[in-house]
Amino acid sequence: MDLKKYLPFLQWLPDYNKDYLKGDLSAGITVGIMLIPQGMAYAMLAGLEPIHGLYAVTVPLILYAIFGSSRQLAVGPVAMVSLLTAAGISSLGPSSPAEYLLYALTLAFLVGLIQFIMGAFRLGFVVNFLSHPVINGFTSAAAIIIGLSQIKHLFKINLPNSEHIQEMALAIAQNIGDTHWLTLGIGLLGILIIKFGKRIHPALPAPLIAVIAGILLVWGFGLTERGVKIVGEVPSGLPTLSFPSFDINGWSTLLPIALTISLVGFAESFAVAKTIQAKHKNYKLDANQELMALGMANFGAAFFNGYPVTGGFSRTAVNNQAGAKTTMASVISAILILLTLLFFTGLFYYLPSAILAAVVLVAVAGLIDLKEPFELWKKDKTDFAMLIATFLITLTLGIETGIITGMILSLLVVIYRASRPHMAQLGRVPGTKIYRNIRRFNDLEINKNLLIVRIDGPIYFANVEFIRDKMNQWLSERKNQTKMIVFNMESVTSIDSTGAHALYEWIQTWRTNEIDVCISGTKGPIRDVLNKWKLIECIGADHMFMDDYSATAYFDQTLDSKSQEKYAPYAIQSNVDKK
């Protein structure tokens, strides 16, 4: 067994040098500083005490550093997963903070279990069913919901925990008159610092500067006495061992949201990891290993008082920009958080909740993509409809319903497109042996008695009716002039049993109607299928051709018999023959 495949850190550790350390140290400290306010803010978004956000960026980071195949991915709490965690647990109606935490730990364990099993069974491809328009629509809607959920902290007004925009908008309208203006002012100051601090330099720890400014304002002017809500006592010390619930009934309740977090978290993580890896050619990204690594990170969160984690866009970009060469940068970030937990948690006592809300609001604002819908409207109406449907359903019916609906829509579009493969009638380019689609070119040579058809895709149970109907339409348009059909199969990728039976039936029917049939351009795997189902025997070896030109010459009776005999094996031979 190749340990380096399952423990990717062994690929870089033996050759680790000072140049690597310089970049990793710089990136580790930079991202660690980012993680302090982000971890606390996202934990609050997830409905947990801020300390659990710091716990979630200790052991999980170290575990990912050991098992992850990306050398720049920064793992930890993210806005999307935090909101999904809050939405999933709130729907269960926990009776106490302790029960809420137990649900969060159990959720992290289930997410880890799902991701690890998916990785172990090489199921990384499943995330492909979340198409880009679906992810875009879902992310934009979720970002709006996340933003609205922070209004209660920014304005210090009472709002219900909801993931439905209509309920949130109504509650905000009813309670906006109770705005605490001092809290709002602090929150807006935090937003300005974070937003414009990034413009000064991308590596500037603007969120931390906002946190320091907020703490100094509240402490220096005694603003707690004027109603500004603060984080309060933050427990110090290393994260202690914790245990999720192993109650099967609880698992069954949390499983849908755990599956959603697993897929959405992996999709977000792998997308950014793939983008960054394209800039580094010294290692390869493995989707299945990434799943197992994220699974291990979530196990770490479950057993050390954290909550579900995944790779984050902004932190990973900063990690790469700050010079991270290996996952040692994540270890350094984790060490910095551990030092904070040991010695510096007391400094966060006067941290205003409005500043943490500002951190979340600035982070999610970048997730709302206004450009993509307009692009899709111009270029792909189907994908536009998918994006808008996912967006509206997520906004109105909830996060979980939105992503599940998006996945179903993606599958339906895949099935619809697969059931309607592109088909083309071909004509010969004058003076050549090349054939092209007659709908795209006006000067092709076309014989009204010869129908040459190319199918671009598989022939299987979902599309045989469409292919048959299209063939009948074209034959009808030619007013029964067709004497021979040539099936160009150079673009056919597979044929299942239904497709084989349909081909056999079509050949028999057309020949009964005095229309001969030939097949051209088959690839090896297709010839194997034709041979297994005795379709070569049905159509006749002398009706199998390497290309359309040979088939046309056969129809015109200009094909040299010696050449036909010489090249016939290349048109009919399969693995079965070879054996």
Image (cartoon, rainbow, N blue to C red):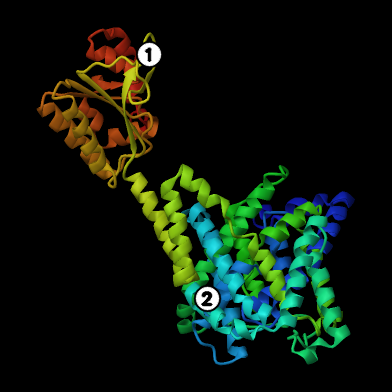
Task: Tell me which residue sits at (79%, 89%) in the image.
Answer: 224
Q: Which mark is residue 433?
A: 1
Q: Which residue is mark 2?
A: 169
Q: Is residue 508 above or below residue 183?
A: above
Indicate left or right for 428 with 477 as reference.
right
Q: Amino acid at mark 2?
A: Ala
Task: Tell me which residue sits at (42%, 63%) in the image.
Answer: 405
- Which residue is at the front of the view, 2 or 158? 158
Q: Is residue 445 above or below residue 195?
A: above
Indicate left or right for 491 with 327 as reference.
left
Q: Quadrant of residue 98?
A: bottom right
Task: Tell me which residue sits at (43%, 60%) in the image.
Answer: 389
- Which residue is at the front of the view, 193 or 470? 193
Residue 1 percent location from the top left of the image: 63, 54
Looking at the rendered image, the quarter that the C terminus falls into is: top left
- Which residue is at the front of the view, 28 or 495? 28
Label 2 crowd bin: few (<14), some (14–19), many (20+), radius 10 Å? few
Q: In front: mark 1 or mark 2? A: 2
Task: Tell me which residue sits at (84%, 63%) in the image.
Answer: 29
Residue 430 percent location from the top left of the image: 36, 11
Q: Secondary structure at mark 2?
A: helix
Q: Amino acid at mark 1?
A: Lys
Residue 359 percent location from the top left of the image: 72, 70
